[in-house]
Image (cartoon, rainbow, N blue to C red):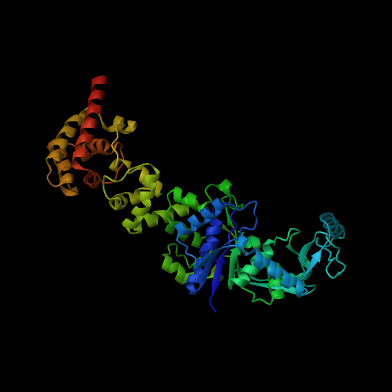
Amino acid sequence: MTLTTRFAPSPTGYLHVGGARTALYSWLYAQKNGGDFILRIEDTDLERSTQESVDAIMDGMNWLNLEWTHGPYFQTKRFDRYKEVIEQLLESGNAYRCYSTAEEVDAMREEAKAKGEIEKYNGLWRDRTDHPEGQPYVIRFKNPIGGDVVIKDMVKGDITISNDQLDDLILARTDGTPTYNLTVVVDDWDMKVSHVVRGDDHISNTPKQINILKALGADIPEYAHIPMILGDDGKRLSKRHGAVSVMQYRDDGYLPEALLNYLVRLGWSHGDQEIFSREEMIELFDLKDCNRAPSGFNTDKLIWVNQHYMKTMDPEYVAEHLAWHMADQGINTDNGPALADVVKIQADRVKTLKEMAQISRYFYEDFTELDAAAVKKHLRPVVKEPMMLVKQKLAALTDWSPAPIHAAINDTAQELELGMGKVGMPLRVAATGAGNSPSLDITLALLDQNKVIERIDQALAVLEARIAAS
Ligand code: GLU
């Protein structure tokens, strides 16, 4: 039998990091075992489900490169099947029509509460056959009386729940629409899901689902309930804590590999190893090694992982992602150095690709404004002479590459008996518009020779204006 996992989001928002981690764990476990991974959209809540959210979830899955083998399935397309199974449960005596009104059910709950008992439906219609004609009814599950349900959870260990704690839950509402626990059960059964991996906020549903599966004579899948992700204040991670949407992390400049690596470690570990390639994750990940306790989201660590990937992945690949950010920031990269060359020199200078794009604009766009602080500090009257001389030497180069560029700067400094910085810093400000850049010879080599000369002239003009004003 093929091992099958699934990711079953409700399309009521974007794909958030908690969902992405659940998807990742499900995907990894299937990959590891040569199994199937299903994407199932649980869109039965018609009021809250949107196509926009379906698209956002798929975008997130695609960006993370978590490929599903089957689906996406949509629960709204399966209503006939749910009806069929509800009928089957009625016929086998595992479900019943309940004609109690909402007020009556509330009263039952109040009564139970007053007696200090578990608040639930009292089973009034469980065995009755005197069904009133034309009255609205819901269909309830005949939860077993007595005995226990044991969840053999791969993460949390065995969890035992007494059947007496469980309600005769509603399977179909008065309008005939199926409820969440019924649809999940039918789908997990029909889709032959062997391992249900989901957040532990669903753990209270699991015994109900197990009971329904048993009533249907279905195999019970293995369960793995993953603890929540917490924000820095120890509360469940939410928008309040900052970015939670996967696509927001793309927009903020993280590589998908970095986010996946960060997420796999958030709730699972393998010794003290921090960096896992996709292949290693697949090889080493196991549901049974997941943490039982919730994990705290730590942006500094995510940044660290992102820096690692920007520096160590193939620059050509990183460049594909940088290209997205360049475009996002309106920087046209058609003319200028290859983005992979920019990645090579900028990767260890930034936390994110967004920042990398920001500080790489000067490779592709001319500027007329120079950073004011850098001008003040480095474009002083004394640098006029070295600027003129270095310009002359750079203009004369026939080989526009780092070594001769370096020599031109060095020779200028020596001829004028100045430190390298006295030549290099004003040159840097001229060429890049600011006082920070990677090594000057490499930076200049990536720029066009004529462009550098033009930019030196531009800086000299600023310098002249400054001299004239003083
Ligand atoms: N649709 C549910 C959710 O988004 C998940 C159900 C499940 O994984 O069983 O929370």
350 in relation to 170, above or below: above
Most extreme residue toward the front is 134
Can residue 145 be seen in this snapshot? yes
Q: On the picture, is 459 further left or further right than 80?
A: left
Indicate the quadrant containing the C terminus: top left, top right, bottom left or bottom right.
top left
**Could you tell me residue 128's position as x and y percent?**
86, 69
Viewer-closest of 287 and 104 = 104
Residue depicted at x 23% and y 27%: 461
Can residue 222 be seen in this snapshot? no
13 in relation to 392, above or below: below
Residue depicted at x 54% and y 67%: 38
Q: On the picture, is 260 further left or further right than 223?
A: left
Q: Quadrant of ligand 1?
A: bottom right
**Could you tell me residue 223's position as x and y percent?**
61, 70
Viewer-closest of 413 and 51 = 51
Most extreme residue toward the bottom is 1
Residue depicted at x 27% and y 50%: 338
Viewer-closest of 423 and 74 = 74
Residue depicted at x 78% and y 74%: 93
Viewer-closest of 234 and 178 = 178
**Could you tell me residue 383's position as x and y percent?**
21, 31
Q: On the picture, is 320 further left or further right than 38?
A: left
81 in relation to 351, above or below: below
